[in-house]
Image: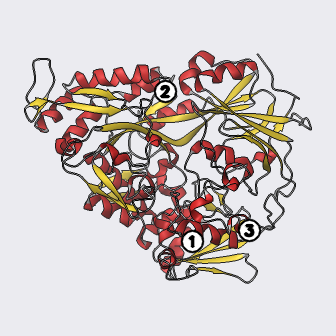
Amino acid sequence: MKKKLIALCFASALLLIALGACTRDNDEPVSGVIPAGHPLEAMAAVLEDFPVYIDTDAAHVPGTTLYYGIAATVPWEGMIGGAIFHDSTIDAQIAAPMGTGRSLLSMNEVYMFGQDGVARFEYDLEELSFTMHMQRDVFWHDGTPLTLDDLVFAFEVMAHPDYTGVRFNAEAQAIVGIMDFRNGLTDSIEGLVLSNNNRTLKMYFTNMGPGMFYFGIWTSPTPRHIFEGIPVAEMAESEWVRTHPVGWGPFMIEHIVYGESVTMVRNPYYTFGAAEVERIQINRVHPDLIAEHMHNGTFDVIGFPTAEFGDHSSPANFRYLGSPVGDYTFIAFRLGIFHPEDPENPWGPGVNVYAPTRLASQLGRYFRQAMAYAIDPGFIGETVFNGLQFPAATNLPPNHKHLIDMNIPGFDYNPEKAMELLDQAGLTEWDDEGYRMFNGERLTIYWAYPEGPTDHIIVPFYINSWSEVGVRVELWRGDTHPAFTIWDYTDFDLDYVPGEGDFIHMFNGGWTVGANPNPEGSWGHIWWNFSRYTSPEYDAILNRMTTIEAFDEEYWAQIFSDWQLYWYENVPYIPLLWTVSLTALNNRVAYWDTRHYTNPTWNRVRLSAAQPYGR
């Protein structure tokens, strides 16, 4: 009974973590109080200048179209017919009004499952079960009733050996019998038990951890009546994913220009009531042109780049909302190799293996620490991004600030300490041009950085900072991928041949962390972990996150403290910047909400004029 009591208190207890304390090694407190000068304090001060939602008294003008812009330099991928198929934040944005990837459960203020969705839930930690009950009548866009059998179908798709997506994660693999289903030993998944009317689904797990309740359990259905009969290997390229997606959100597809634009109309079957807006028109726009289009009244809504804010801080015809998000940028060192279970599906399940012969591995943790101390992301956040990005003090994003260990100092700009650490790393010999040597030759680090509107400022700034401590860094663009992004690769280990060295030693990237703070989904044994770092100690910390003991809030916070401390000491990647997310709204938008626990609210959007206002 004690386990049940802990579980029942867990959701509310997490709200109190910031007020309490637990211990590390029985002496050092894990503080939840934000100390003076911490980047979270600076972020909170900036956010006071921006509302998170707008809800005016202005009446909605019937028959209007919402013009929504999405910034992208190239055509988007267009896998919008279900979240189990797409792995792009742009595809997720496009799919949101249609509800093709929407959860049946709501989200609360601490990013956990809530009880206000179209389904509610209960769970039992003694029998390792999670039960969902439909509490509203829901229909797909074609009028077919949505049931929890559609959620069972989603698990059947992702567990199929021909599934090419990335959603078959550790939580899904913990469902009782799902691996037997995957291996063809059974025709159904033993741990998924439906009621006779398909409105109650009980899931049994081999293990459970708190991360499951941060949307770690998959709760987004896939319409069985649409996809059944299509080979799983062909689903992602089918019309139901690419051109004719069927969801259950307030808007449904009308027209697509592949990779460029999407037109949606109201869904008459939407369970929460018909949308105010008649249509949504989504168009791709180059990031460099966002400000111009907003001043000209092209769009009602678009994410606004923080680097452009300084020149457009007081617009006449639009305004800004600002919110903290789970975004952070990083520099990751290439430290291992990923071995997929199926070489034909490199995105599927697999393991990372530490590679001691890789240069970043040979140079060791003192070298990686030094590379972090040698640069000043805070200066970039203040100058390039107009004070709207902040040095990441740790490897957790600010949307999970209740789990951030405030005692971990992070890597403040300290070139003197970087010099000392490089000496500790054994890099004490210098060449005639002022660069450090390794194994008798000048050390050169090849750094892959994505092409973008600010790279001409950031890249030389960091390269110069590293050169000042004696490390020569060259920008790697590659012959086949001159505009480097991590998404250009199906297998990031193509640049590495054992025994012949590796050609990328570190690279820049960025993550948008969702509701689940468990890092297994981005830095564990998964394709997404592009540093490929792993160790027995690191794995042991991650494994503790998926145990019953972790439902104790102090123990849960302690695990995250241990994980952050291990990262700080070993530095498989350098967190660079946390960001404030800006949303630009035309002045005719009378209702918009960026709060995660009130979304999705597409049906409540109101427009107070027939067309967007120009300057």
Which mark's residue is nearer the viewer, 3 or 2?
3
Identify the residue position indicated by label 3 in the image. 225
Q: Amino acid at mark 1?
A: Leu
User: Observer-nearest residue: 117 or 460?
Assistant: 460
User: Observer-nearest residue: 180 or 274?
Assistant: 180
Between disc 3 and disc 2, whose residue precedes? 3
Residue at 74%, 64% (x, y): give it.
118
Q: Is residue 386 left or right of residue 271?
A: left
Percent x, y for residue 554?
42, 62
Residue at 66%, 53% (x, y): give it.
241
Q: Quadrant of the C terminus?
A: top right
Residue 529 numbered mark, or none: none
**Where 559 sits versus 608, above or below?**
below
Q: Quadrant of residue 408?
A: top left
Q: How many residues crowd mark 1 within 10 Å: few (<14), some (14–19), many (20+)?
A: some
Identify the residue position indicated by label 2 in the image. 452
Which mark's residue is nearer the viewer, 3 or 1?
3
Residue at 76%, 80% (x, y): give it.
197
Percent x, y for residue 114?
65, 62
Identify the residue position indicated by label 1 in the image. 8
Q: Is residue 608 left or right of residue 157?
A: right
Label 3 – label 1 distance at C-alpha: 36 Å
Residue at 51%, 68% (x, y): give it.
172
**Where 476 sits versus 510, above or below?**
above
Label 2 – label 1 distance at C-alpha: 47 Å
Percent x, y for residue 534?
29, 56
